[in-house]
Structure formats: C-alpha cells, structure tokens
Image (cartoon, rainbow, N blue to C red):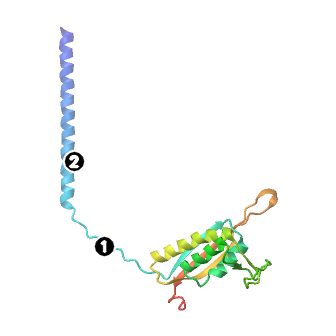
Amino acid sequence: MEEGKQNKKIEKKKEEKSEVKTEKIEEKKETAEQKMEEKKIDKKPEKKKPKVITPKENAVVNGKDLRLSLKHCISICKMLGGESPERAVEILEGVVLGKVPVPMKDREVPHQKGKGIAGARYPKKVAGELINLVKQLSANSVVNSITNPVITIAKANHASRPFRKEGRRAKRCHVYLEVRSKLARGKK
C-alpha cells in the first residue's frame, strides 16, 4: 500500500513540475512576442541617403609577380602609353594574332620584313596577359567615373625572381598601369 501511495506522490510531483515548465515556456513566448511588437512600434523607417561617389582623378591596376618576360613587358608598355583602354585592347589583340609587331629598338632582335620597323617581335603570351589587365583598368576607370580615359603611366619593373632547377632564376615582373581623363592629363 505504501508503495502505491509513494508512486502517486511521485507522479503528482512530476505533473506539477511539467506544468510549471510549460507555464515558464509560455511566459517566455509571450515576453518575446511583446518585445517584437515593441521593436516594430519603436522603429521608424529610416531614410536611406544616396551614396555620393566623388570622381577620382585616376584609376590604377597592378599586376604583381607575373610570369612574363620583363623585356617584352617594357616594350609593350612603351607602345600602350597615351592610348585609350579600348585602343590598347585592339593593339594587344593584333599582337596576339601576329598582325601588329611590337617595336624593340633598344634590344637586339631581328628586323621584320616589309614592316618598316628596325627590330620587332610578337610577344603573344605577354599581350594575352596584358589584355586582362587593360580590361580591368577600363572597368576601374568606369567605377571612378573617368571620362575619356587615357593610359598615362604604363611601366614594368623587376619582381623577385625565385630559383628554379640548377640555380636558374625564373622570370617575373610587375606591371603598373594608370589611367587619367584626357582633359586632366595635362594639368597634373
């Protein structure tokens, strides 16, 4: 008999505990709902300010540690100076196709027959890589709201050259391209 009474007492305690738990959960839900409603009431629609983009003077693109010949990069950069990005892409595509030679006056390279250029080559790999850089440069000029962009600075520099097999050095170079507005070009 005593065991039956104890079991009933235990069951009553369990029921009371579960009722208390459900009451606490319901109270938490109610308070959470009240807080959400208060937040909705408190929040006023904020006016979004339009972003004002100030036009910049120049747009820049950097090609770091490119696996390209420095000699070829220097020659192509000389050729691209003063051109618009669209015209530069046309020139580089002509180099890739083998129609536009890249003059290399100060280098010992063979003459091109019938081209009227003393020494020239067709560095296709370099031209292909620089096409991507020039396209990025034109995109940067659009973002910086530059009208009539012209490539003002095009230069190639040495990069750190890692060692390859048997103590040979790999070729690496940095390429820096800068674009300015055609009107602001002379002001500097």
Query: Considering only vertical position in the picture, is 8 above or below 185?
Result: above
Residue 76 lies, in percent from the top left, at 66, 77
Residue 23 lies, in percent from the top left, at 18, 36
* Quarter of the N terminus within the rendering: top left
- Amino acid found under the numbered disc labelled 2: Ala
Q: Residue furthest bottom?
A: 187
Residue 170 lies, in percent from the top left, at 74, 63
Q: Which residue is mark 2?
A: 32
In the image, 46 versus 103, the foreground residue is: 103
Q: Is residue 3 left or right of residue 50?
A: left
Q: Which residue is mark 1?
A: 49
Are the residues flagged by discs 2 and 1 in contact, CB closer than 8 Å?
Answer: no
Q: Is residue 158 left or right of residue 34?
A: right
In the image, 65 versus 22, the foreground residue is: 65
Instruction: State the SS at label 1.
Output: loop
Q: Residue furthest top?
A: 1
Query: Considering only vertical position in the picture, is 113 above or below 18?
Result: below
In the image, 162 versus 3, the foreground residue is: 162
Image quadrant assignment for residue 112: bottom right
* Quarter of the C terminus within the rendering: bottom right
Q: Please rate how many residues cluster around mark 1, counting C-alpha atoms within 10 Å: few if below 14, some from 14 to 19, many from 20.
A: few
Residue shown at the point (79%, 77%) measured from the top left? 110
Image quadrant assignment for residue 39: bottom left
Image quadrant assignment for residue 24: top left
Residue 52 lies, in percent from the top left, at 37, 77
- Tell which tag, 2 or 1, sits nearer the viewer: 1
Residue shown at the point (55%, 76%) measured from the top left? 60
- Amino acid found under the numbered disc labelled 1: Lys
Residue shown at the point (79%, 61%) measured from the top left? 168
Instruction: State the SS at label 2.
Output: helix
| Residue 165 disc label | none
